[in-house]
Image (cartoon, helix red, strand yellow):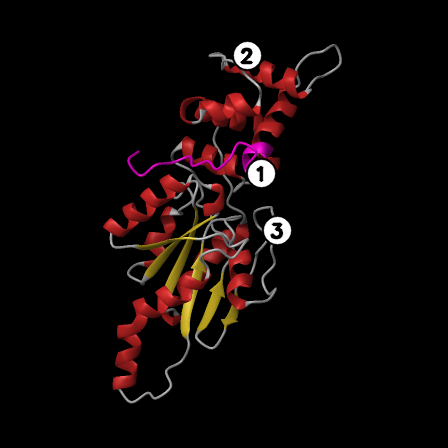
Amino acid sequence: MTIQWFPGHMAKAKREVQEKLKFIDIVFELVDARIPTSSRNPMIDEILVNKPRIMLLNKADMADEEITQQWIAFFQKRHIKALAIDSQAGTGVKQIVAAAKEMLKPKFEKMVAKGIKNPRAMRALIVGIPNVGKSTLINRLAGKHIAKTGDKPGVTKAQQWIKVGKEMELLDTPGILWPKFEDEEVGLKLATTGAIKDTILNLQDVAVYALNFLKQHYPDRLKERYSLTEIPEDIAALFDEIGRRRGCLMSGGLVDYDKVAELVLREIRTEKLGRLSFEKPNE
């Protein structure tokens, strides 16, 4: 299955980001803590060039805590400041402005040295793929409901400057996905975590990927959630077991694989199987 999703507003967003960069002091790159690599847009490095950057591992409350700490260490070894946050609950959000101030301290000290008594507010750009939580984070930072939020990707479709107290101005951008996922597994991870609209996906294919991942990395969670004594090797047999135990049946008692797929993905996304990470740094 090849997953592609690149609406016209995303191509426009890329151009607009490039045009605004000259006004930007620092970039906040928001990724999904469950899939920090797959939820990074490879175009971002090309677009941002050498701008100071802070990596924000959002939805950290949904990710495996131990693995998230491994990711923070991984990025720091590469001289990238990384913070684990939960924009929905506000956990870790206060440290973002402080980290930005610390990173930009030399720049603003130079401005003062040149005779600028009251340097302007920091100008930050926030970037990330759809449904990674940008609008929710902006509302947290601003302390009020400014940016539109939603549980479906593609809610933000225009850029806007937003004041974060007196210290920062933040430029929001629509989520930007790249035109084609070179690695099919990247697309499947994004689909599993809800970064791509379900309406353009074959959910059975996505659920097959997710269940195979759980079998390998979180087998006990899988058995506990679906009351399995053993996990069938055959994926169709696993679908059948889950379908029968959870009542995903058609007339005649046949298992409805579409309903099983929807059930599994919904329960992964709503943490019914606990905190999950689908990528590790050493992989």
Q: Of the residues tagged 1 and 3, which is closer to the observer?
A: 1
Specify whether 253 is left or right of 159: right
Above or below, 5 against 111 in this view is above
Amino acid at pointer 2:
Ala
Above or below, 46 against 35 in this view is below
Report the residue at 45% width, 63% height from top: 94
Mark 3 residue crowding within 10 angstroms, few (<14) / some (14–19) / many (20+): few
In the image, 169 versus 232, the foreground residue is 232
Q: Is residue 275 magenta?
A: yes
Amino acid at pointer 3:
Gly
Residue at disc 3, secondary structure: loop
Location of mark 1 (residue): 270
The answer to whether any part of residue 55 appears in the image is yes
Above or below, 86 against 23 in this view is above
Mark 2 residue crowding within 10 angstroms, few (<14) / some (14–19) / many (20+): few
Range of residues picked out in magenta? 266-283
Mark 1 residue crowding within 10 angstroms, few (<14) / some (14–19) / many (20+): few
In the image, 99 versus 138, the foreground residue is 99
Q: Which mark is residue 203?
A: none
Q: Earlier in the sequence, mark 1 or mark 3?
A: 3
Q: Is residue 152 magenta?
A: no
Location of mark 3 (residue): 150
Specify whether 95 is left or right of 134: left
Report the residue at 38% width, 62% height from top: 27
Q: Which mark is residue 237?
A: 2
Asked if disc 2 and disc 1 are in contact, CB closer than 8 Å, the reply is: no
Residue 224 screen position, x and y as percent: 53, 23
